[in-house]
Image: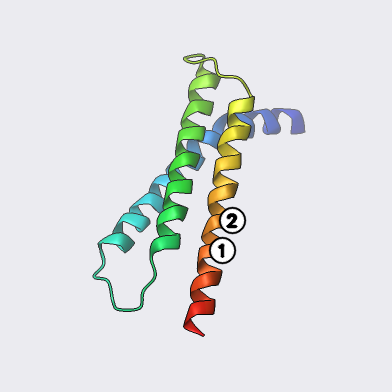
Amino acid sequence: MTHTIAICLGTVAPYYNLVLVAIVIILFARMFKLPQKKGVYLRPWRYLFIALLVYVAEEFLTITNKLGVTNIPRISTAFFEMIIIALFIYTLLLQKEWVKKIK
Protein backbone atom coordinates (compact mmCIF):
# COMPACT_ATOMS: atom_id res chain seq x y z
CA MET A 1 0.00 0.00 0.00
CA THR A 2 2.71 2.52 0.91
CA HIS A 3 4.60 1.71 -2.27
CA THR A 4 1.60 2.71 -4.34
CA ILE A 5 1.06 5.95 -2.44
CA ALA A 6 4.72 6.89 -2.82
CA ILE A 7 4.63 6.21 -6.55
CA CYS A 8 1.44 8.24 -6.95
CA LEU A 9 2.84 11.19 -4.99
CA GLY A 10 6.08 11.04 -6.96
CA THR A 11 4.13 11.19 -10.19
CA VAL A 12 1.79 14.02 -9.22
CA ALA A 13 4.20 16.16 -7.15
CA PRO A 14 5.71 18.18 -10.01
CA TYR A 15 2.24 19.16 -11.22
CA TYR A 16 0.94 20.52 -7.94
CA ASN A 17 4.33 22.13 -7.28
CA LEU A 18 3.88 24.14 -10.48
CA VAL A 19 0.38 25.17 -9.41
CA LEU A 20 1.68 26.42 -6.08
CA VAL A 21 4.58 28.20 -7.79
CA ALA A 22 2.13 29.90 -10.16
CA ILE A 23 0.36 31.35 -7.11
CA VAL A 24 3.69 32.58 -5.73
CA ILE A 25 4.59 34.17 -9.09
CA ILE A 26 1.28 36.04 -9.05
CA LEU A 27 2.07 37.29 -5.55
CA PHE A 28 5.54 38.41 -6.67
CA ALA A 29 4.03 40.27 -9.63
CA ARG A 30 1.61 42.06 -7.32
CA MET A 31 4.45 42.97 -4.96
CA PHE A 32 6.57 44.41 -7.76
CA LYS A 33 3.62 46.48 -9.03
CA LEU A 34 3.06 48.18 -5.67
CA PRO A 35 4.23 51.79 -5.45
CA GLN A 36 7.72 51.81 -3.98
CA LYS A 37 8.19 53.67 -0.74
CA LYS A 38 11.47 55.29 0.12
CA GLY A 39 13.76 52.89 1.98
CA VAL A 40 12.26 49.68 0.56
CA TYR A 41 15.02 47.38 -0.66
CA LEU A 42 13.70 45.11 -3.41
CA ARG A 43 16.97 43.86 -4.89
CA PRO A 44 17.08 40.63 -2.83
CA TRP A 45 13.47 39.95 -3.72
CA ARG A 46 14.32 40.20 -7.41
CA TYR A 47 17.04 37.57 -7.02
CA LEU A 48 14.61 35.38 -5.11
CA PHE A 49 12.17 35.77 -8.00
CA ILE A 50 14.90 34.71 -10.46
CA ALA A 51 15.56 31.63 -8.30
CA LEU A 52 11.85 30.86 -8.44
CA LEU A 53 11.88 31.10 -12.24
CA VAL A 54 14.85 28.70 -12.36
CA TYR A 55 12.81 26.33 -10.19
CA VAL A 56 9.91 26.57 -12.65
CA ALA A 57 12.26 25.70 -15.51
CA GLU A 58 13.58 22.73 -13.54
CA GLU A 59 10.08 21.44 -12.77
CA PHE A 60 8.99 21.93 -16.36
CA LEU A 61 11.96 19.89 -17.57
CA THR A 62 11.20 17.23 -14.95
CA ILE A 63 7.61 16.95 -16.16
CA THR A 64 8.60 16.77 -19.82
CA ASN A 65 11.22 14.18 -18.93
CA LYS A 66 8.65 12.02 -17.11
CA LEU A 67 6.25 12.34 -20.05
CA GLY A 68 8.98 11.21 -22.41
CA VAL A 69 9.02 14.44 -24.43
CA THR A 70 12.64 15.22 -23.57
CA ASN A 71 15.54 13.17 -22.42
CA ILE A 72 17.74 15.23 -20.13
CA PRO A 73 20.45 13.80 -17.88
CA ARG A 74 19.92 13.76 -14.12
CA ILE A 75 22.90 16.08 -13.63
CA SER A 76 20.86 18.94 -15.07
CA THR A 77 18.58 18.99 -12.02
CA ALA A 78 21.63 19.25 -9.78
CA PHE A 79 22.87 22.14 -11.89
CA PHE A 80 19.53 23.96 -11.56
CA GLU A 81 19.47 23.37 -7.81
CA MET A 82 23.03 24.71 -7.51
CA ILE A 83 21.92 27.90 -9.27
CA ILE A 84 18.93 28.22 -6.94
CA ILE A 85 21.05 27.73 -3.81
CA ALA A 86 23.64 30.22 -5.06
CA LEU A 87 20.90 32.81 -5.65
CA PHE A 88 19.47 32.17 -2.17
CA ILE A 89 22.88 32.66 -0.57
CA TYR A 90 23.50 35.82 -2.59
CA THR A 91 20.07 37.12 -1.53
CA LEU A 92 20.91 36.54 2.13
CA LEU A 93 24.28 38.27 1.77
CA LEU A 94 22.65 41.27 0.08
CA GLN A 95 20.11 41.53 2.87
CA LYS A 96 22.84 41.23 5.51
CA GLU A 97 24.82 44.07 3.92
CA TRP A 98 21.68 46.20 3.71
CA VAL A 99 20.89 45.68 7.40
CA LYS A 100 24.49 46.44 8.32
CA LYS A 101 24.34 49.62 6.20
CA ILE A 102 21.16 50.81 7.93
CA LYS A 103 22.62 50.40 11.42
As rendered, which of 96 and 25 lies closer to the eye?
96
Amino acid type of the residue that numbered disc 2 sits on in the rendered structure: Ile
Question: Where is residue 90 drawn, in percent x and y?
Answer: 54, 56
Residue 1: in sight, yes or no?
A: no
Above or below for 21 versus 95: above
Question: Where is residue 86 drawn, in percent x and y?
Answer: 58, 48
Is mark 1 in CB contact (under 8 Å) with mark 2? yes
Q: Is residue 39 left or right of residue 15?
A: left
Give the farthest residue toward the right: 2
Q: Secondary structure at mark 2?
A: helix
Which residue is at 51% across, 34% downward? 58
As rendered, which of 46 and 6 lies closer to the eye?
46
**Disc 1: which residue:** 93
Q: Residue 47's image quarter?
A: bottom left
Which colouring convention does the figure follow?
rainbow
Above or below for 7 versus 93: above
Which residue is at 63% across, 24% downward? 74
Q: Residues within 10 Å of mark 1 (few under 14, many from 20)?
A: few
Above or below for 34 versus 54: below
Q: Which mark is residue 89?
A: 2
Give the farthest residue toward the bottom: 103
Which residue is at 35% across, 78% downward? 39
Q: Quadrant of the N terminus?
A: top right
Amino acid type of the residue that numbered disc 1 sits on in the rendered structure: Leu
Q: Residues within 10 Å of mark 2 (few under 14, many from 20)?
A: some
Question: Where is residue 80 drawn, in percent x and y?
Answer: 55, 36
Q: Secondary structure at mark 1?
A: helix
